[in-house]
Image: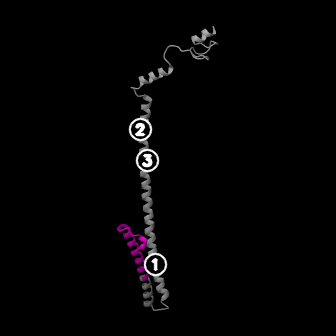
């Protein structure tokens, strides 16, 4: 009776699903489970799965939302950078103005300090001459930098050789 139960597809204890046994499987006629699965896939191949279509739609919506958020973020970042650059430029201009005033005060102070040693006109001439020497040195340095910059764009010559 035990062999007959196995051939019928039942377990020896009579429990469990029919067709499942612990003994080696006996070939039974009928479709195999993996063949049925392939048949199901073939039937659905013509129609897209609705959940995948919904997921792709959600993905496209999320990508659009992300792009809008990124654009808004970059706009606010550009506004912040523009304000920061504006404030920094204003601070640089004020610093240059104050530096100019400081140099004027230095020149006046030098004239006042040199007046007892030499005459007023002599003090003015010394301060004026010293400032002209500083200006000449700065202009020569700027000319050299300009030549180096020109050499970068005009030939293959090393800018340090100028």
- In the image, 38 versus 116, the foreground residue is 38
Percent across and percent down for residue 28 are 53, 14
Is residue 77 depicted above or below 19 in this figure?
A: below
Residue farthest toward the right in the current orientation of the protein = 13
What residue did someone put label 2 on? Answer: 60
Q: Nearer the N terminus, badge 2 or badge 3?
A: 2
Residue 44 lies, in percent from the top left, at: 42, 24
In magenta segment, residue 161: yes
- The x and y percentages for residue 126 are 44, 87
Classify residue 50 by image quadrant.
Answer: top left
Q: In which quarter of the image is residue 122?
A: bottom left
15 relative to 103 in the view: left or right: right
SS of the residue under disc 3: helix
Q: Which residue is tagged 3?
A: 70
Q: Where is residue 125 in the image (x, y as percent from the top left)?
A: 42, 88
Q: Mark 1 points at which residue?
A: 103
First reached walking from the N terminus: tag 1 or tag 3: 3
Gap in angstroms between the C-alphas marked 2 and 3: 15 Å
Badge 1, how many Cα within 10 Å: few under 14, some, many 20+?
A: few
The image shows residue 50, relative to residue 22, as above or below, that is below
Q: Is residue 136 left or right of residue 18?
A: left
Q: Residues within 10 Å of mark 2 (few under 14, many from 20)?
A: few
Near-viewer residue (85 or 29): 29
User: What residue is rendered at 50% in x and 20% in y?
Assistant: 33
Residue at 46% across, 23% down: 38
Task: Judge from the rendering whether residue 80 lies leftward or rightward of residue 28; answer left or right.
Answer: left
Residue at figure coordinates x 44%, y 49% from the top left: 73
For the residues carrying marks 2 and 3, which lies nearer the camera in this image?
2
Stretch in magenta: 133-162
């Amino acid at each position: 009776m035990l062999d007959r139960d196995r051939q019928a597809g039942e377990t020896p204890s009579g429990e469990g699903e029919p067709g499942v046994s612990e003994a080696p499987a006996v070939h039974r006629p009928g479709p195999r489970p993996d063949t049925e699965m392939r048949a199901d896939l073939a039937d659905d191949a013509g129609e897209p799965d609705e959940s995948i279509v919904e997921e792709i739609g959600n993905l496209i919506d999320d990508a659009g939302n992300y792009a809008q958020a990124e654009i808004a973020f970059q706009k606010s970042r550009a506004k912040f950078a523009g304000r920061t650059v504006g404030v920094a430029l204003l601070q640089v201009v004020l610093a240059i103005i104050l530096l100019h005033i400081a140099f004027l005060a230095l020149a006046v102070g030098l004239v006042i300090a040199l007046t007892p040693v030499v005459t007023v006109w002599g003090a003015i001439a010394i301060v004026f001459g010293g400032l002209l020497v500083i200006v000449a040195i700065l202009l020569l340095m700027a000319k050299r930098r300009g030549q180096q910059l020109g050499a970068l764009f005009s030939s293959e010559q090393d800018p340090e050789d100028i």
